[in-house]
Image: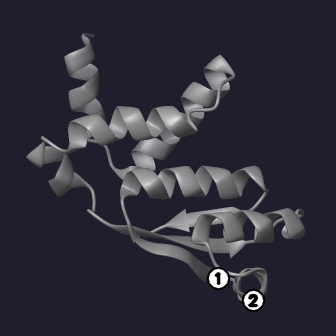
Amino acid sequence: MTTEQILEAVDSMTVKDLHALVKALEEKYGVSAQAAVAMAVGAPAGGAAGGAAAAPSTVKVILKSAGQQKVQLIKKVKDITGKGLKECKELVDAIPAVVKEGISPEEAIQIKAQLEEMGAEVELQ
C-alpha cells in the first residue's frame, strides 16, 4: 500500500476502528502511539469530506469504571479537565461520568488511552 492509500483508509475509519488500530500497533511494535495518533489522524481529516461523514465531529469521553488506581486516576482527570482536585474526585466517584465532551475524535482517543493506562474503563460516544 502507498502512504496515500493508508491515509485514505484511516480517513474512512470510525473512532472505534481507529482505537482498535492504535491498540494493535502498540501491541505489535511495543510502542505508545498517543502523539502519533493526533498527527496521523488529524492531518488528513481537515481536507477529507468522506471521513467527516463516517465519524462524528465531536464526541464525549465517559468514565465507566475507575479500576484499582483511583488516586492516580483522579490526578489524571485533573490534568485532562483542568478542574480542581475535589471536583475530579466527585466526578470519579459518580461513575458513569462524562470526563470531557464536545471534543474531536482524535483528542477523545488520546484521553481514553491516558485513562485506560490508569486502569479505568472508558467509553467514547
Please identify the quadrant where the N terminus is shown. top left
Give residue 20's position: percent from left, percent from top.
51, 41
2 or 1: tag closer to the N-terminus: 2
Q: Is residue 90 above or below residue 14?
A: below
Label 1 SS: loop
Q: Residue at x 41, y 50 (%)?
A: 106
In this figure, which residue is indicated by the disc labeled 1?
A: 96
Q: Which mark is residue 90?
A: 2
- Asked whether, in this view, residue 88 is left or right of residue 56, the answer is right
Most foreground residue, 62 or 42:
42
Bin the neighbour count of mark 2 within 10 Å (Cα to Cα): few under 14, some 14-19, many 20 and up: few
Q: Which of labels 2 and 1 is toward the front?
A: 2
Q: Amino acid at mark 2?
A: Glu
Give residue 71's position: percent from left, percent from top.
88, 69
Bin the neighbour count of mark 1 within 10 Å (Cα to Cα): few under 14, some 14-19, many 20 and up: some
Q: Disc 2 to disc 1, how far (Cα)?
A: 11 Å
